[in-house]
Amino acid sequence: MKNRSLSFWLFLTPTLVALALVVIIPVIMGLFYSFTNWDGLAFTEMVGFKNYAALFQDTDFINAFWFTVRFVITTVILLNVIGLSLALLVTQKIKTSNFLRTIFFMPNMIGGLILGFIWQFIFTQAFTALGNALNISWLQNWLTNETTGFWGLVIVTVWQMSGYIMIIYIAYLQNIPQEVIEAAEIDGASAWQRFTKITFPMIAPAFTVCMFLTLSNGFKIYDQNLSLTNGGPYKSTQMLALDIVNTAYNSGNFALAEAKSMIFFLIVAAISLLQVYYNRKREVKL
């Protein structure tokens, strides 16, 4: 670091300044405000851990936390399974592979709010019309209860992000030496054996990256939750990010919202770091 030239620091300074202004300083200020009675404009006293004690008695926050945990577990599994499956499909020697890659990736280019409103129309109008026509009860009245609202959010998220996860797996699959695969095939290894013994161990770093992205994205989802269900009915599909925003802007309790956001930050950071550490160790074993 001592040997770095002046030009290196000149180029790095704007990035460091932006990081400090957008991330580091707001986190420090948020941590400070979480110990006050801040109303969004000013505070009159320090209240210590009162906000943190209050959030653990907040049933909306607790319900949103467990709903988010269920959502994250489900989407992480589905996104990685579907994303890897799509990557394996489009890396085969088929004529339409480039076309399929484009089709699978396109949903990721649609904004979260727009995506939520599009799927809200599909769930409430198209599904209902199809259910009435075919006399299928479970297709009717989607997003009107916690179960269908949960699976609606899962479907939207998986549909949007599967193509993005696919691209990451493709990058690693294309770096696998074909000579190794061909040698295993000549030795009589089945397709499943080639996948489990050669392909998957060699794309383990991609699995680590995709796990991190799907975990962090699952916890931070806000726009799809807002536009698709808005936490309804009766906050049964409200996720952590939406609960924090509602606490601040609907209830006007900005200090409590800051306390929730600090706990939220610690949860996401701890889970993400543990996941990366565990997967890195498994990469070495594989």
Image (tube, grey):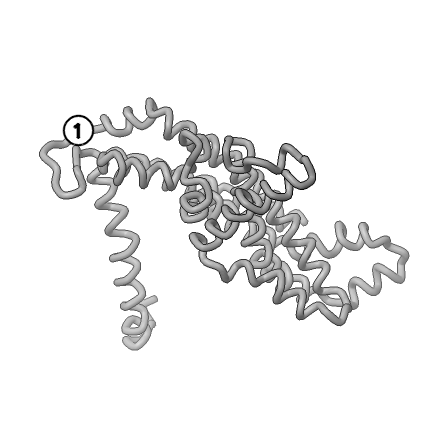
SS state under label 1: loop
Left or right of 187 on screen, residue 264: left
Q: Residue furthest top?
A: 57
Left or right of 6 on screen, residue 284: right
* Residue sitting at x 63%, y 34%: 138
Residue 211 location in percent, x, y?
A: 55, 48
* Residue sitting at x 21%, y 45%: 29
Above or below, 158 against 247 in this view is below
Q: Is residue 5 visible in the rendered structure shown here?
A: yes
* Residue sitting at x 45%, y 30%: 236
In which quarter of the view is residue 46 placed?
top left
Residue 60 location in percent, x, y?
A: 37, 28
- Residue occupied by mark 1: 47
Above or below, 41 against 167 in this view is above
- Residue flagged by tag 1: what amino acid is it? Val
Q: Nearer the viewer, residue 139 or 35?
A: 139
In which quarter of the view is residue 127 placed?
top right
Q: What is the crowding at mark 1: few (fewer than 14 residues within 10 Å), some, or many (at least 20)?
A: some
Above or below, 266 against 162 in this view is above
Residue 215 location in percent, x, y?
A: 50, 45
